[in-house]
Image: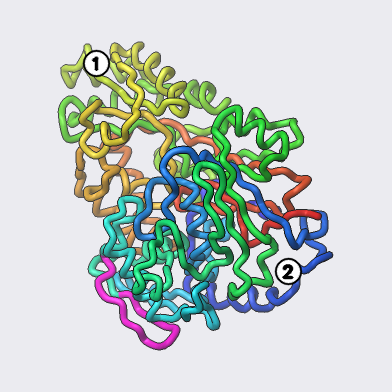
Amino acid sequence: MRDDLSRGRSWMLRGAALLAALTLVATACGGNDGGSGEGTGAEGGGEVDPDGVLRIPYNLQGAPPNFDPANQRPPSPATSIQLMVYDTLLRPTGDNGELEPGLAKAVDYVDPTTVKIALQEGVTFTDGTPFDAEAVKAGIEYSRDSESMVLTAERKSIEEIVVDGPLELTLHLSEPVAGEIVNMMAYGDFLIPSPKALADGVDLETNPVGAGPFELEDYEQGEKITLVKNEDYFQADDIRLAGVEWVNVAPGESLVNALRSGAVDVGEMVPHQTATQLEGTGVEVELDIGDNVMMWGQVCKSRPPFDDVRVRQALNHGLDRDALNDAVFGGEGAPMWGFWTDDGELYDPALEDYFEYDPERARDLLAEAGQEDLSFDMFFSPGVSDRAAEVVQAQWSEIGVTANLKPLTNTQDFFPDAQGAPMFFFPLERDGIQKVARNLVPGSVGNVCNWDDPELTAAVGDVRAAETGSDEAAEAWQRVQERAMETAASIFGVFGVRARVWNPDRVGDPSFMPNFQGRPTVNFYEAYIKQ
């Protein structure tokens, strides 16, 4: 099995030359080899069931999913289903963060404000409309002009889209963010709906029309979402699933029982605590540290007392990260020094132990700031970060700080203006520069109280502009991390643990790929159901 979630990946796209080479490899390996024909052998053991349907658990209670790619809501089953229905221009391989061709056969980073796209031939939407440059132009403009807060802010920089030919187009950007624009072509910002569906006023929230490997067949409110294979998909011979079902399963014990009993086949975005309950039960469990899983505190840095950097530094020095790691992740996580784990290419060893646990230093900083008896309210996520919040509360009490814990039941109580409490300690899951840009740069709802440090903002901008994997990107990342630590821009806690969980008796080739948050989601391009 491919190690799709190696620690410290840097999300590198090595330019159009690599994509062209990968296209040739994909073509050479395509056709009916490894296809879904009856009796076909496959890696991972077991014959492929041509009628095999992959069953994925998800809590479907509450508001129905929204399948409109330009009107996305926070993570729901729709997030993954949209990828299956629409497909993406590029795909994350999971190996060192590299990207490979999807609906685009090549993407060329020209300069910080210019990106060229060459599309695959012979692709159509499920309504028969050609997937060509004009369709992609219309789809990108549709997402760019939406008011979705889930999509990244960089999309707004797409100033002009020039159709250079039937299958070629160029994006001209108003800001130097080409590096990040290329990265996001593997995710939700560049899901392209049928232009005919847009023109006809089709309700994409309930009736998505894409060019991906699956189609939405049915949605039973609160019970099940059913996808079926798109037989006209341009790489249909390589898709070995006949369909995918999202089955309503509540989190916690119900999820554990559903996976143990075989009622579902694979767990997506399974919490660490749940995954550990499945070890030794016959369910396959793989755990690793995730640089995208950040158990940390976000704080309103634009108002007293947290506008004083000494207060933020004190709280960082008052945090025993090893004890926090032991309590929340069983010691399987890692202290957070910057934004990358210690075996990642962008890890900066000079930042290790930057805020070492030092209660005496913490108390001195609070005294300097005139906050010896600091007291404040702190939100936590019920069922997710409650244990972490209790540990942090106890540790800070030792430096004379009182953190009054409050469960966050409405995100608007904290984002964007911290009206209900000035701090929120929680696990954030984001990948690449988005784990900084969406939380510490002005213009994002995740940047509580709209804090702005011009030096940090400029460094983030340089990462966005640079070609991912380049020396320029690495240098800019170093400045981002140094400045974030210097300003104590967050309460840096620990990197958490990602879990991959599946039924080995049912699922063949159970590889996973990261979604836009870096969470492991099943690789539906490769997985199959065994006969």
Q: Which residue is mark 1?
A: 375
Q: CA distance from mark 2 to mark 1?
A: 62 Å
Tag 2: amino acid: Gly
Q: Quadrant of residue 264?
A: top right
Q: Element at badge 2?
A: loop
Judge by depth and name the residue closer to the eye, 52 or 300.
Answer: 52
Q: Which residue is mark 2?
A: 35
Relative height, residue 341 to residue 396 (above, below): below
> Which dot marks residue 512?
none
Q: Position of residue 387 (x, y in %)?
A: 46, 21
Closer to the chain start, of discs 2 and 1, is: 2
Q: Position of residue 482 (x, y in %)?
A: 33, 43
Judge by depth and name the residue closer to the eye, 285 or 128.
Answer: 128
Q: Is residue 98 visible?
A: no
Question: Main SS of the magenta segment?
Answer: strand
Q: Is residue 485 visible?
A: yes
